[in-house]
Amino acid sequence: MAEQGWKADLPRPAQRYVIVVDEAKFAEAAAQRLLTRMTSIKDRIAVCLTGGSSPEGLYRLLGEEPWRSEVPWDRVHWFMGDDRFVPLTDPRSNMGVAKRLFLDRSPAPRGNIHPLPTDANYPEGAANIYEDELKSFYGADRLDPARPLFDLVLMGLGPDGHTASLFPGSRALDEKSRWVLAVTKAGMEPFVPRVTLTFPVHASTREMLFLVDGSGKRDILQRVFAGEDLPGSRAYSDGELVWLLDRAAAPETVS
Ligand code: 6PG
């Protein structure tokens, strides 16, 4: 495993860990963590990816040797936690980025890649279709905390504290029953309609791994770790909740 500074003892939730690594080791530490998680599972594996720049180094590694040969591609299913309602070929598409950086360079079976259906007529329709797809993959309409939907969920943190497409002040933050929602109002500028998994669905995982790097994230991380009511602080996991930070992003209280 890459160099780590383990810091536990954050106030909530109980199973929260922060790992701080040097900038140069950030992507490798994420890849190692993902591989360790995947190889601990003997049957079907479900990974929920995230957008943004923070996971791009990880995605590049997964598309290259020696990492590519380590991934049990036949058994891994790749989902996306949120996306802009744009075609996969649009540079703003999160799944489009993941495809270009590693999925298209891998032997992943086509049926194992589950993009949000941004070819639906409306974001609401895409949310309904993806919710059905997730329920069918899971084999039930209700999530059982003892049987997580995902094995690993990647998350990012925006400068305003958003995570996935769950933005400060949005009613989506309180959603308990829907699995997937259209985001057609609040959000980042310039506005692009989005589709996002809700918190309870992101939480249905053995491990939630936040990837946050760069000095521009230090202030918002400080606020999240102080427990301010922000989407990033509301994210929870039925399994482990791990924050992987580089030294530039880590607030003084954890570095
Ligand atoms: C997206 C993400 C979003 C992202 C954060 C952090 O589609 O952009 O889902 O929630 O994870 O904005 O982005 P960075 O990694 O670029 O800082």
Image: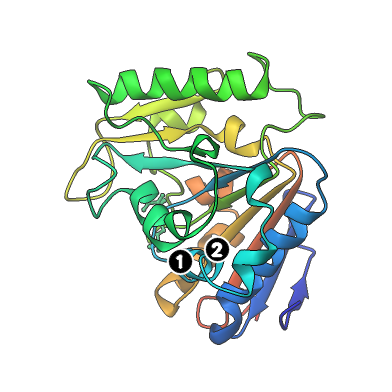
For the residue labelled by badge 1, is the local secondary structure a helix, a strand or a loop? loop
What residue sits 35% from the left and 30% below the top?
Answer: 117
Q: Crowding at label 1, few (<14), some or many (≥20) Cα neighbours within 10 Å?
A: many
Q: Where is residue 76 in the image (x, y as percent from the top left)?
A: 64, 45
Q: Where is residue 219 in the image (x, y as percent from the top left)?
A: 46, 70
Residue type at the position of mark 1: Ser
Examine the image and state in which quarter residue 169 appears.
top left
- Residue 31 in sight in this render: yes
From the viewer's perspective, tell me whether residue 163 is left or right of residue 65. Answer: left
**Callout 1: CB less than 8 Å from ligand 1:** yes
Q: Identify the image quadrant of the C terminus.
A: bottom right
Q: Identify the image quadrant of the N terminus.
A: bottom right
Callouts 2 and 1 close, C-beta under 8 Å: yes
- Label count reads 2
Q: Crowding at label 2, few (<14), some or many (≥20) Cα neighbours within 10 Å?
A: many
What residue sits 42% from the left and 37% below the top?
Answer: 115
What residue sits 52% from the left and 62% below the top?
Answer: 223
Of callouts 2 and 1, the N-terminal one: 1
| Label 2 – label 1 distance at C-alpha | 6 Å
From the viewer's perspective, tell me whether residue 90 is left or right of residue 11. Answer: left
Numbered badge on residue 23: none
Q: Where is residue 47 in the image (x, y as percent from the top left)?
A: 61, 45
The single residue placed furthest to the top in the displayed view is 141
**In front of the other: 112 or 127:** 112
What residue sits 45% from the left and 66% below the top?
Answer: 54
- Residue 166 in sight in this render: no
Numbered badge on residue 54: 1
**In front of the other: 88 or 86:** 88
The residue identified by callout 2 is: 211
**Callout 2: CB less than 8 Å from ligand 1:** yes
